[in-house]
């Protein structure tokens, strides 16, 4: 029997995925047709991204799962019409992209590269940066992306600690967890990387109180979500010198409005939500493998816990 996969991921996306997904489905031995429109009751799986106009999942009575092309699911997870299981994207290319972005920006701040990139002629003032083992890097969120980044940073030799909701044991990484573990984690972090999902519990988790716990002059790298940060508190902390630099990839409003102070602050680097992107070639294999699992009666991988919100 042929499966019907509804691609509800915004303009042009189905086009990008058609060839790699057809190939990946075939490799899994699945017979499926990829459509952008279908009678809802005939749909077996929905492939979803936030740019899709699809908001009412009620009529998709036969859909066995909704597969998100995004890792972050904050724009769909609370949809009351979504009763089907939801999987978020966990994909090797997405992870690799994030690891490269995070390591690049951590090294930039660790080595103080800006001082040399922006140096004026004659500015010959050598400052010896500490070596990686003397630099404490903290990763907030130790999921698919945060853990990969923490482990990659550890390979450079950084003194890495991490913070998550539930306790973790990761070789060589000092793991903290839960609200009680937050202060100790932040106090020991000179370069902070935020890879938390946006949920009610993480909204504005970096605010005046928590930013003040970081060592003075700490750097922040946020490829998680804009809403993790209280923007005004961050600007005040940058102005006071409490935060030395912020590299921000995600924002409460995207694209970041031209007039937003982040664009103009000398110690803020704005990147336009490019830290990691879901690439069709590898994501298609992830989608096909997950569909094959469900068809074989196995549990969906990377299923979102709706109550937790991620
Ligand atoms: P995961 O769901 O795999 O991991 C989330 C991590 O956050 C887990 O370790 C979880 O803890 C922790 N966490 C969640 N809530 C809390 C809390 N209240 N207190 C402490 N820890 C918490 O997500 P991913 O790693 O795949 O992705 C993380 C985020 O990265 C995405 O949600 C998305 O917002 C962002 N992202 C950004 C991209 C970009 O290009 N800028 C690209 C892709 C993703 P526990 O393990 O204990 O459950
Ligand atoms: C994602 C993202 O969540 O690109 O996948 O931010």
Image: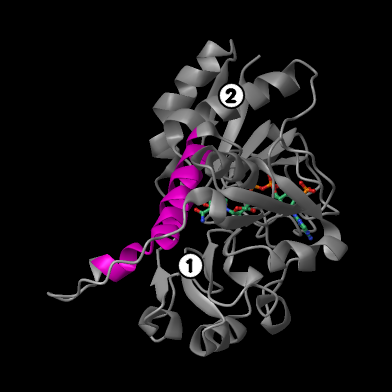
Rendered position, 247 above or below 2: below
Judging depth in this view, the residue of 177 and 227 nearest the camera is 177
Rendered position, 83 above or below 266: above
- Picture disc at residue 288: 2
* Residue at x 76%, y 59% (from the top left corner): 78
* Residue at x 54%, y 44% (from the top left corner): 153
* Residue at x 62%, y 47% (from the top left corner): 146
x, y percent for residue 48: 59, 45
Tag 2 secondary structure: helix
x, y percent for residue 228: 65, 69
x, y percent for residue 67: 64, 39
Rendered position, 51 above or below 243: above
Is 298 within the magenta?
no
Looking at the image, the residue that sits furthest to the left is: 121
Q: Is residue 200 visible?
A: no
Secondary structure predominantly adopted by residues drawn in magenta: helix
Q: Nearer the viewer, mark 1 or mark 2?
A: 1
Magenta highlight range:
93-116
* Horizontal side, residue 213 vs residue 249: left or right: right
x, y percent for residue 5: 59, 31
Tag 1 secondary structure: strand
Location of the N terminus by quadrant is top right
Judging depth in this view, the residue of 15 and 219 nearest the camera is 219
- Picture disc at residue 248: 1
Quarter of the view holding residue 105: bottom left
Crowdedness of circle 2 by 10 Å Cα count: few (<14), some, many (20+)? many
Q: Is residue 12 visible?
A: yes
Judging depth in this view, the residue of 229 and 192 nearest the camera is 192
Distance of mark 1 from mark 2, alpha carbons?
A: 33 Å
* Horizontal side, residue 7 vs residue 58: left or right: left
Quarter of the view holding residue 190: bottom right
């Amino acid at each position: 029997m042929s499966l019907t996969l509804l691609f509800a991921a915004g303009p042009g996306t189905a086009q990008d995925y058609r060839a790699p997904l057809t190939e990946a489905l075939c490799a899994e031995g699945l017979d499926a047709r990829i459509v952008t429109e279908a009678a809802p009751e005939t749909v077996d799986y929905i492939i979803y991204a936030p740019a899709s106009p699809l908001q009412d999942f009620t009529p998709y009575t036969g859909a066995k799962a909704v597969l998100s092309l995004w890792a972050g699911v904050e724009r769909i997870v609370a949809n009351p019409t979504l009763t089907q299981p939801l999987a978020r994207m966990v994909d090797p290319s997405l992870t690799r992209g994030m690891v490269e972005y995070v390591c690049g920006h951590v090294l930039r701040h660790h080595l103080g590269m800006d001082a040399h990139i922006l140096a004026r002629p004659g500015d010959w003032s050598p400052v010896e940066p500490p070596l990686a083992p003397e630099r404490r890097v903290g990763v907030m969120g130790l999921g698919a992306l945060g853990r990969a980044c923490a482990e990659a940073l550890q390979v450079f030799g950084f003194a890495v600690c991490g913070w998550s909701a539930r306790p973790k044991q990761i070789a060589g990484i000092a793991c903290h967890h839960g609200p009680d573990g937050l202060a100790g984690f932040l106090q020991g972090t000179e370069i902070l990387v935020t890879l938390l999902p946006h949920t009610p519990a993480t909204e504005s988790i970096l605010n005046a109180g928590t930013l003040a716990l970081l060592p003075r002059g700490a750097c922040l790298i946020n490829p998680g979500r804009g809403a993790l940060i209280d923007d005004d508190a961050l600007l005040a902390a940058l102005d006071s010198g409490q935060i030395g630099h912020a590299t921000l990839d995600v924002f409460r409003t995207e694209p970041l409005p031209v007039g937003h102070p982040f664009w103009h602050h000398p110690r803020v680097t704005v990147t336009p939500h490019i830290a990691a992107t879901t690439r069709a070639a590898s994501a298609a294999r992830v989608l096909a493998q997950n569909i094959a699992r469900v068809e074989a009666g196995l549990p969906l991988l990377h299923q979102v816990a709706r109550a937790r919100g991620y």
